[in-house]
Image: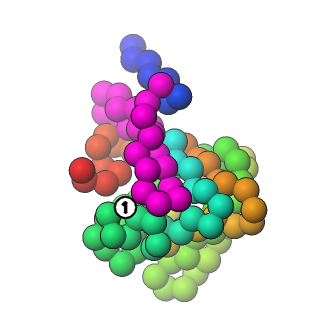
Amino acid sequence: MQKATLADIDSDVHGLISKRTAELEGVAVTEVTFGVGARWSSDLKGYAGTDLCELPHVAYVLTGTLGVGMADGAQETFSQGDVMLLPPGHDAWTVGDQPCSFVEFSRGNDYYAS
């Protein structure tokens, strides 16, 4: 049995985007917050080193609304209570005047290489 408390983990901040990751055996749970005006291509692109986010994401939206655009031009918004599955090759941004927070589940340390 394992337990972690996200509130006890220091945030990793990149511009207007912050994340806290709890590493459990075989799975990482990350709370991500896109502040008002945050956009992946502005705040994380340089850190990731790719034009678009190339990692898949499975997440549950806690608050706010996240806009997502795919390389092929498809767009969708995800709001509080939505579950999202994002394939590689996307950009994401906060929609509206409140931050968007979501909890993401991944197979260990595959969010971004340090």
Q: Nearer the viewer, residue 52 or 1?
A: 52
Q: Position of residue 76 (x, y in %)?
A: 65, 71
Main secondary structure along the magenta-highlighted residues: strand
In magenta segment, residue 85 = no
Mark 1 nearby-residue class (10 Å; few <14, some 14–19, many ≥20): some
Q: Which residue is mark 1?
A: 55
Name the residue located 75 percent from the left edge and 62 percent from the top edge. Answer: 97
Label 1 SS: loop
Amino acid under label 1?
Answer: Leu
Q: Which quadrant of the figure contains the N terminus?
A: top left
Name the residue located 67 percent from the left edge and 44 percent from the top edge. Answer: 62
Q: Is residue 52 above or below residue 66?
A: below
Q: Is residue 105 above or below residue 91?
A: above
Q: Which residues are magenta?
A: 8-29
Q: Nearer the viewer, residue 16 or 24?
A: 16
In magenta segment, residue 9 = yes
Q: Indicate the quadrant where residue 100 lies.
A: bottom right
Q: Position of residue 99 (x, y in %)?
A: 67, 54
Name the residue located 74 percent from the left edge and 66 percent from the top edge. Answer: 96
